[in-house]
Image (cartoon, grey):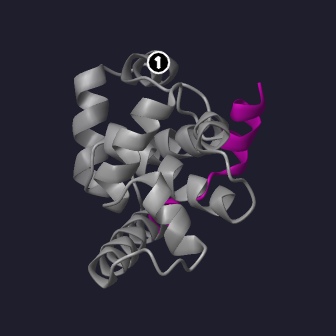
Amino acid sequence: MFSNSLVCDILDYINKNINCEITIDELANCFYFDRTYIMKKFKKEIGISIHDYINKIRILNSLDYYKYDNHILSTALKNGFNSIEYYSEIFKKIIGVNPMKYKKFINRSLDIKENEIDIIIKNVNECNNIKLKANSYLNRRKPTTKMEKVLKLR
């Protein structure tokens, strides 16, 4: 069974623009569909809202920065967040601990509790599973015909 082409196009758009501001209205204008239809279709096919998908992918992408960058603000800005406060709020909601605790986890600090480690691992795995599900969904996209490729180039 093939994936819905609109949802695939939305996923492609989000993945290519993940570090930029992305709104539902922007997606609706870009793909010429009603915003409510886009939100419902995406959630039905992927299992989470567009907004949650964007935030989880941004946070997941930001985790790699903690290996090399010690500045939470620059990590937030590099991953599409406009403020450290909002980034920290979303980070804690998705990962289960604040960014400072996560830095301690990455640095293998003794100042982090066992239950916090378990929460981090569980939530990071959940984000990875969402990313894998989206990639698997994209891989089931209906192949384009030669004529569709020609029309798309125009």
Tell me which corner region of the image, top left, top right, bottom left or bottom right, holds residue 123.
bottom left
Comparing 24 with 63, the one in front is 63
Residue 96: x and y, percent?
30, 61
Image-based side of 52 in relation to 133, left or right: left
Q: At x 25% / y 47%, what residue is drawn?
A: 43
Quadrant containing the C terminus in the rendered view: top right
Tell me which corner region of the image, top left, top right, bottom left or bottom right, holds residue 89.
top left
Residue 98: x and y, percent?
39, 53
Q: At x 46% / y 15%, what residue is drawn?
A: 29
Comparing 117 with 17, the one in front is 117
The verdict on residue 144 being magenta is yes
Q: At x 72% / y 42%, what residue is drawn?
A: 149
The amino acid marked with disc number 1 is Glu
Quadrant containing the N terminus in the rendered view: bottom left
Q: Main secondary structure of the magenta part?
A: helix
Comparing 104 with 20, the one in front is 104
Give the SS element for disc 1.
Answer: helix
Residue 22: x and y, percent?
49, 27
Mark 1 Cα within 10 Å, few/some/many (few <14, many 20+)?
A: few
Image-based side of 122 in relation to 23, left or right: left
Image: magenta residue range:
135-154
Image-based side of 106 in relation to 101, left or right: right
The verdict on residue 60 being magenta is no
- Disc 1 marks which residue? 26
Residue 63 vs 152, above or below: the answer is below
